[in-house]
Amino acid sequence: ENRRLREQAAAMSAQRGSSASVDGLFDEPDEQQVADQASLLAYENAFKQVTAALESGSTPSAELYADRDLHMHHLSDADLHAQYKSCMELYLNESTSSSTRGVLEMMLIKLGELVGVPQKRRVVMIEREAAEQRHKA
């Protein structure tokens, strides 16, 4: 699935950056940029699935929350900050349902803990956590 997301991100980047390079402004994205875009797409997809479940009155599965958290840890520093801001705006929006607001509150706590941690360190943290979970199972 990660390969598919990376391919989608690369295709989107290729569409945007297909014009000639002007002092490097439109150069092809490097591997990290493609991975960051794939992580953002995967995170947004998982987030939408969580909120859709809540809005429909069902409880998202633990696996869905874990998937969202995995992709949250892989977000670039800039994307993580943007997601924090976006979640804060949704949380403060009066039209947000109480169930979604509750999840947003927990997400804001998680995002707030991660904002000061560099991306590479966050990835190591989540991979170590996943390895521990597999070891326990």
Image (tube, rainbow, N blue to C red):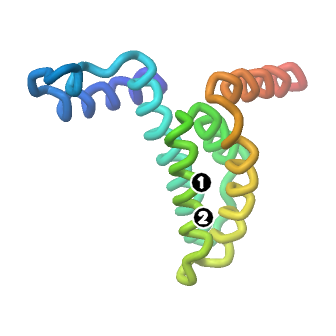
Residue carrying label 2: 88
Q: Residues within 10 Å of mark 2 (few under 14, many from 20)?
A: some
SS of the residue under disc 1: helix
Residue 87 x, y percent position in the rendering: 58, 60
Residue depicted at 34% across the width and 30% down the height? 9
Tell me the number on the disc at residue 128: none
Residue depicted at 44% across the width and 40% down the height? 41
Which residue, as the protein is rendered here, is positioned at the far front? 23
The amino acid pointed to by label 1 is Tyr
Image position of 127 (left or right of 56)? right
Which residue, as the protein is rendered here, is positioned at the far right? 136
Residue depicted at 9% across the width and 22% down the height? 20
Which residue, as the protein is rendered here, is positioned at the far left? 20
Image position of 55 (left or right of 13)? right
SS of the residue under disc 2: helix
Residue 115 x, y percent position in the rendering: 67, 43
Q: Residues within 10 Å of mark 1 (few under 14, many from 20)?
A: many
Q: Nearer the viewer, residue 26 or 109?
A: 26
Which residue, as the protein is rendered here, is positioned at the far top? 31
The amino acid pointed to by label 2 is Met
> Do callouts 1 and 2 mark residues in contact (Cβ within 8 Å)?
yes
Residue 89 x, y percent position in the rendering: 54, 68
Q: CA distance from mark 1 to mark 2?
A: 6 Å
Residue carrying label 1: 84
- Name the quadrant of the C terminus: top right
Q: Would you identify the image quadrant in which residue 25 lies?
A: top left
Whether residue 67 is situated above or below residue 1 in the rendered picture: below
Q: Would you identify the image quadrant in which residue 128 lies?
A: top right
Residue depicted at 56% across the width and 62% down the height? 51
Q: Would you identify the image quadrant in which residue 15 lies?
A: top left
Count up the numbered dots.
2
